[in-house]
Image (cartoon, helix red, strand yellow):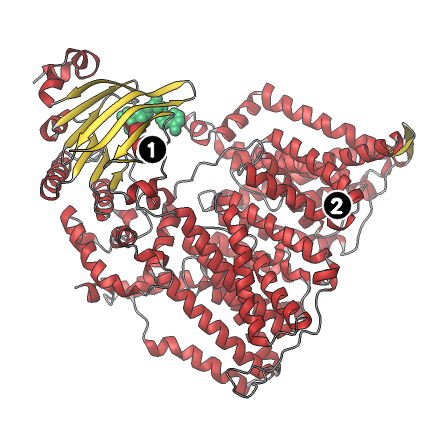
Amino acid sequence: MVILEVRKVVKSFGGLRALQDVDLSVAKGEIRAVIGPNGAGKSTLFNVMTGLLAPDTGNVVFDGEPITGLPPHRIIRKGIGRSFQITNIFPRMSVFENVQAALFSHHGTSRNPLSLARGFTRIGEEVLGILEQVGLAEKYDLSASVLSHGDQKRLEIAISLASRPKLLMLDEPTAGMSRFESRETVALLQKISREQGLTLIFTEHDMDIVFAISEKIMVLQQGAVIADGTPAEIKANPEVRKAYLGEEVTEK
Amino acid sequence: MDLSFLTVQVLSALRQAAFLFLISSGLTLIFGVLNILNFAHGALYMLGAYFMYWITLYIVGTGGFLLALVLAPLGVALIAAVIETGLLRRIYMQEEIYQLLLTYALVLIIDDLAKIVFGPEFKSIPKPDVLSGSVTLFGGTVPVYTLLVVILAPAVALLLWYLLHRTKTGKVVRATSSDREMADALGINMSALFTLVFAFGAILAGLGGALAGPARTVFPGVGTEVIIESFVVVVIGGLGNLWGALIGSILIGSLETVGIIVFPEFEMSLIYLLMVAVLVVRPWGLFGRPLKVKALSEKNLAMEAQEISPVHFSVHPAVRWAPLLLLLLVPLVTGRFYQYLLSQIFIASLMAVAFNLLLGTTGLLSFGQAAFFGVGAYTVGLLATKAGFGTLPALFLSPVTAAAAAAVIGFFCVRLSGVHFAMLTLAFGQLIFTVAYKWYGFTGGDNGIQGIPVKPISIGGLAGIDIGSNQAMYYFVLLVVGLSVGLIRRIRSSPFGATLKAIRENGQRASYLGVNVKLYQWTVFVIAGAFTGLAGGLYALMEKAISPEIIHWTKSAEPVFMTIIGGIYTFVGPAVGAVVYIVLNSYLVAWTEKWALVLGLVLLTLVLLLPGGVVGFVNEKARQILGKSGCIRRWSFSKSAK
Ligand SMILES: Nc1ncnc2c1ncn2[C@@H]1O[C@H](COP(=O)(O)OP(=O)(O)OP(=O)(O)O)[C@@H](O)[C@H]1O
Ligand SMILES: [Mg+2]
């Protein structure tokens, strides 16, 4: 079953065609990588899919519903989570509060200005549960701004997970992490995807990771899709080898 | 309409536009490069006029008029350079509010210093004979001085264009104002550039003052009128855009001239109406672009300690209720003066605490809170005097009308952020002010409303309770403010409040939690407006007389001061700030005329040394001491969560 469908999306910035007729179809529960050299348009694609940018033409369908041009908050409510390439958290709030805010929004408790802090206990447990999942439970009372870069990335994943998305988009989830941290994070993502049937779309520059966990890979170059298929197909694709992977794959 | 009339009017509009352009071009240039909206720009204008006065009178004489026209702006530039290197430079890394406030503190200080040095009276600057006469142009009589101004300003504009486009430094300035990071990356010497641009902007302001002084008059505080007008100009044109300042000046200059002829009553309202209309259609002004959201700097991150700290030590209930008990006892042992003073403090606290729901909690700097205060006060005043409403029904409606006003104003304002948000709230506030000031038939105009009756309160058949006496009024105000502040506290600690905080920290991320950021901002704007309106209603009941001054934008600055004095990231901070502000005010005004100077110095000191405010400072120290002694480690929620 297809959960996300991107059809013929075009996005230009002035004269620059950042996305040209991009098609993408992701099945439920799939782990999908979007790769491509710097400036290929990966983040732009994520921005279009999550409503930060409206596409010039083309559309995006999530779970059978068109979501093209909706603002991010409406898209998130439909069951999409996202983390950003440049860490995007609430710096002057504690780790706990970061995730708590996400849960308040998810449960709809935050809409009533007069609601008492009563539901906090239940939500508090839920927060700790999520923090445990990403390995930040011990640091719950630290200010998010003092966390290491890797921990901040993990916190952002925790925030995104808190709204119980059906589809999670991660823009370079391991950027700037140590090798050990990256492995851990990747293992975590794989586990969550398996256990909860969560669909993952991620971008990544580390090809080891990409080929280790993705079920399908899409390759973008200068805004255009040059290949889309299983890791084996991508490895074998001559255009990809020439244009992008080059010696990285032949080395192996 | 004949040609002579037209000539005179066109030239008068151009003259006005010329003055506006000189001032606002400097303002917008400074904003473009330094990213600071310089409140003190009006004060620099005033200094230009005073220097002109002083130089022509004592040094060069009227014969050296043109020489003085060069010297006065240079004097202003010198002072500006000192301000930039000595003060402004130290807070570039701080949030916008501190920069605004520092320049505001400078206004207070410079105004009072001018009063000390030059005296409080209006000064007129003599012109040389050549410039005093008038000539006939197309049948109309035009002062020679007007011609000078109308020719000089475009010459300055041309010179500016030349400097910016044809010199190396000018190119650097333009590059910096269009892309700060890029300029940084290119290794441009920022601090020298900042000083240069600030001083250069000051030259333009000084020239504006030196040139306008002989045409108008100069007096301490004249800058306050000028600065608001130039804010309107630069915001309409687009902050940081020189072309915008030029077009804005011509627009406003013409509108003022036409307004005086067509709508003499509501000339000022027209200007704010134009500003509102432009910002509604083009939120970033005619030529402006959306500003990049600034990343939080290290220093700001440090202030987080102050907000987190209250969670670490939950205050014992006895400690929390003790002050209230004390306040209940106060009227029994004190006289009318203290009862009145404290009632004033309560009302100011409510306004400040409600304001901080916007600034500290949500990160929205509203500069138009006085409008809601005024709407609430006029609601009570008008209903009680004209419609025979009882005290409670009238007071009950004050937050309702204020909320309605906030709903409309907020709808437009929340589309903007940062300084633009502040400026639009300011424009709406001034719009309401000018209407209340001139609409004699409804609001009583500048006479306001006197003799507001305070009828005895009767609740459900209960005999009337008279709150007319000072003591009864004290308890009444305490009750209403106490309940309101309690309610605000609850709102702030609710999940809704936590979400507001998330919006303040990172609006984009908040929207990626599924939060409709604009809707939340609008909601909190309405809530804050309602409480501010209630404070206004109480004020009307307590004072029994109101005047439009309570809506003026300088009144909107008061909750800002109180919040910064007390502590922006604390709940009680604004209330503590209200105590400090009102007490300082009542005692200093009785004791010295230099109240503004003292306030300015206090604000300056706080901004530079204690940006977290008094309560923030205490919290931080308490946390350090308690933290070292091992009393606190974990947050209090862990008890409930585990
Ligand atoms: N808001 C924007 N305005 C103008 N150009 C943009 C904008 N966002 C992206 N671009 C341009 O679009 C192109 C694609 O950028 P994008 O960030 O999507 O690439 P990417 O594949 O994510 O690269 P990276 O691997 O470096 O993250 C780049 O040339 C970039 O400069
Ligand atoms: Mg990217």
Label placed on residue B509: none
**Which residue appears farthest toward the front when viewing the image?**
A64
- Residue B518 spot, x, y in % from top left: 43, 47
Identify the residue at image location x=41%, y=57%: B569
Where is residue A180? Give x, y as percent. 12, 37
Rendered location of residue A246, percent (x, y):
16, 14
Residue B149 visible in the displayed image: yes
Q: Under tag 1, what secondary structure?
A: loop
Callout 1: residue from which chain? A
Quadrant field for ligand 1? top left
Mark 1: which amino acid? Thr
Q: Specify the quadrant of the image occupied by residue B398.
A: bottom right
Relative to B437, is B394 above or below? below
Instruction: Establish whether labels 1 and 2 are both on one chain.
Output: no
The crowd level at tag 1 (other Cα within 10 Å; few <14, some 14-19, many 20+) is many
Q: Quadrant of the C terminus of chain B?
A: bottom left
Q: Amino acid type of disc 2?
A: Tyr
- The image quadrant of residue B307 is bottom left
Q: Quickly name the residue at label 2.
A: B50
Q: Which residue is mark 1?
A: A68
Q: Nearer the viewer, mark 1 or mark 2?
A: 1
Q: Residue at x 58, y 75 (%)?
A: B341
Residue reaching furthest left?
A252
